[in-house]
Amino acid sequence: MTDRIDKAGLAIGRPLYELMETALSGTGVSSEVFWAELAELVASFADKNAALLKHREAIQETLDKWHREHRGDAFDFVAYKQLLEELEYIVPAGDDFCVSTDHVDPEIATVPGPQLVVPITNARFSLNAANARWGSLYDALYGADIIPESDGAEKGTRYNPRRGARVVAWAADFLDAHFPLESGRHADATAYKVDNGQLAVDVGGAHTGLADAGQFAGYQGQASAPKAILLVHNGLHAEIQIDAEHPIGQDHAAGVKDVLMEAAVTTIQDCEDSVAAVDAEDKALVYGNWLGLMKGDLEERMDKGGQTITRRLADDRQYTAADGSPLRLPGRSLMLIRNVGHLMTTPAVLDGQGNEIPEGILDALCTATIALHDLQGNGPHSNSRAGSVYIVKPKMHGPAEVNFTVALFEHIEKALGMTPNTLKIGIMDEERRTSINLKACIREARERTIFINTGFLDRTGDEMHTSMEAGPMLPKGEMKSQPWLSAYEDNNVDTGLAVGLRGKAQIGKGMWPAPDNMADMMAAKIGHPQAGANCAWVPSPTAATLHAIHYHRCDVLDRQAELESRHADYLDDLLTLPLLDRELSADEIQKELDNNCQGILGYVVRWVDQGVGCSKVPDITDTPLMEDRATCRISSQHVANWLHHGITDEHTVRETLKRMAKVVDRQNAGDASYQAMSADFDGSIAFQAASDLIFKGREQPSGYTEPVLHARRREHKAQRAGG
């Protein structure tokens, strides 16, 4: 039995209790006040939380019944839409309004750029993400497939001068494109210096400067022999680093050793889809790492090349501005924190009747309390210089659930003595009822909204579960060409602009899933800023450095100004169901099953057996893809849908799972801690979890994977502890 501490009528798991007692020190909030406040929040909000979930179930039951009654009939869109209005699944958008969010840091309001999302349970990843505010363009290009490994430009195991020369040339072209000189090219520069507050560049024996002198922001070192030249474009900085004695700089006529890019201007430290946190021990790890980030003392030691390396948060960067005054730029990404949604309860804390409390309530109070360290300046670094705490709230279904979150945040602010609206809200637009009612959702949080973001995978998972009884769905790959998806993406931008988010908040787009395919990312992801998104998710610091180039190529704030005049009615397209419209061959069906089952197993086995909530998981072609619970949700719901409508059968799916388990076992053969599923299908908790996600998929609330994964992970931990 879990060791618990009794406080304020709650039974708190000891690891969580001890962590929060440590976290409270220096906040001005006493232990008695904190635990009493948690008890009060549970008493005031747990029943309301449960009622919202019951309302979700009631809507789903009515929709399921309606689809069953009309199965075989020609789909009556008018009647369907009328039903949604009667259910208040669709609510009136209401009068026009503009958000009034204030005290927002520029990284969110006015500086478009890449956004990293990182599992907060991994301290090394969290630190790397926070420090990805600045990234080496040379390193990113050298390691990426953007530079072809042809004609002697292979990466190899040692530095390849030919590949290095191509990197330097690529970076010089980038500078020419976005920081052009009055005459000549950066590639031909023989010296950079500062003369009378202006950048002076020697090119081919002549002196020149920037075509736009205002792009020169500052420098490090002596004006006559600077170590770094700081440039700015579209709100993002780039730094030309100079050191003629450096192995790279010594081969450059001007001694340029690197171009440092301002990259991940914001990072979401994630407590939700990318982590496996199922009990008090896990939640203590989540909050402990957040505490280290907010106090600025999080460290991670690792061995590299026989040496111990300590990772810490980076210091701010110091320069001399063009006018000679000191200039300081943040050395770290502005950090947001993603709490869990409304669905799950947690055994980390039990109420007076022995019931698990809503995990979202626990997250809100604990992460807000810990953020007091940043607000009060208790560490060497500052996160929010505007005095705000940025909480991304996922998986809310419609405006009533947003209203619930606002009320919860108001209560916490009063309890902790925070200024009203200190706790800002990022609204994940990833559930169907939120997409359809996005304007009404933002209205509920109009004084707090700092972020809206599309998430194709969760949105598709909810699309399938909501319409599970309507009929079989198209293959997954064809979902992206359906009317609802383009409407969803455009509606998110248009609605955000219509309520005044430009210059006040982020309008975001989703993740690039293939961290090793950077050339493809560079070709595709320019579409996000061009669509009007002032941030988009990337899977690694390298990807952030490269994706930053897109924000130089596209002035997002100008693009948003252009899009503000676009007014379209997307509702009918948003409601269009992605139903199968043709006969599938046996080969098509089996390939889809193979793909889905392999993806589910590859993700779930690490989640259940190793507690890894996000990682590079090889797909069926052995291509590493960044996976989290959202990818698992769509795959499991898809197979469940095809099973339900007879596109496949239970025997075929079970045989596919067993065959794909052997594929996943092979893909993980190099992991010494890996437990093969195919050695004992019945005894493998991970294999059983993957099976549950499919065969119990229709009964999972909104098609979410959390109930199954949490139960099976706790089963695995109990088995390991007992064994």
Image (cartoon, rainbow, N blue to C red):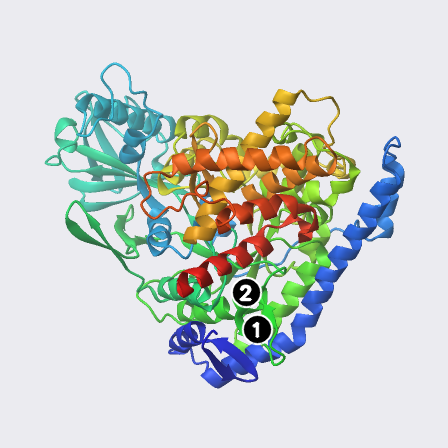
Give the structural element (helix, strand or loop) at label 2: strand
Q: Position of residue 524 (x, y in %)?
A: 49, 28
Q: Is residue 205 left or right of residue 452?
A: left
Q: Amino acid at mark 2?
A: Leu
Q: Is residue 284 left or right of residue 240?
A: right
Marks 2 & 1, CB-CB < 8 Å contact: yes
The crowd level at tag 1 (other Cα within 10 Å; few <14, some 14-19, many 20+) is: many
Q: Amino acid at mark 1?
A: Ile
Q: Please indicate, yes or no, whether residue 94 appears anywhere in the rendered image.
A: no
- Tell me the residue that label 1 is attached to: 412
Which one is in front, 434 or 592? 592
Which one is in front, 600 or 519? 600
Q: Position of residue 637 (x, y in %)?
A: 64, 41
Q: Is residue 119 above or below residue 406?
A: above
* Residue at x 68% of width, y 50% of height: 702
Give the structural element (helix, strand or loop) at label 1: helix
Q: Earlier in the sequence, mark 2 or mark 1?
A: 1
* Residue at x 70% of width, y 33% of height: 473
Q: Position of residue 422 (x, y in %)?
A: 53, 66
* Residue at x 49% of width, y 65% of height: 279
Residue 51, quarter of picture: bottom right
- Tell me the residue that label 2 is attached to: 423
Which one is in front, 75 or 714? 714
Judged by depth in the image, the label closer to the viewer, 2 or 1, is: 1
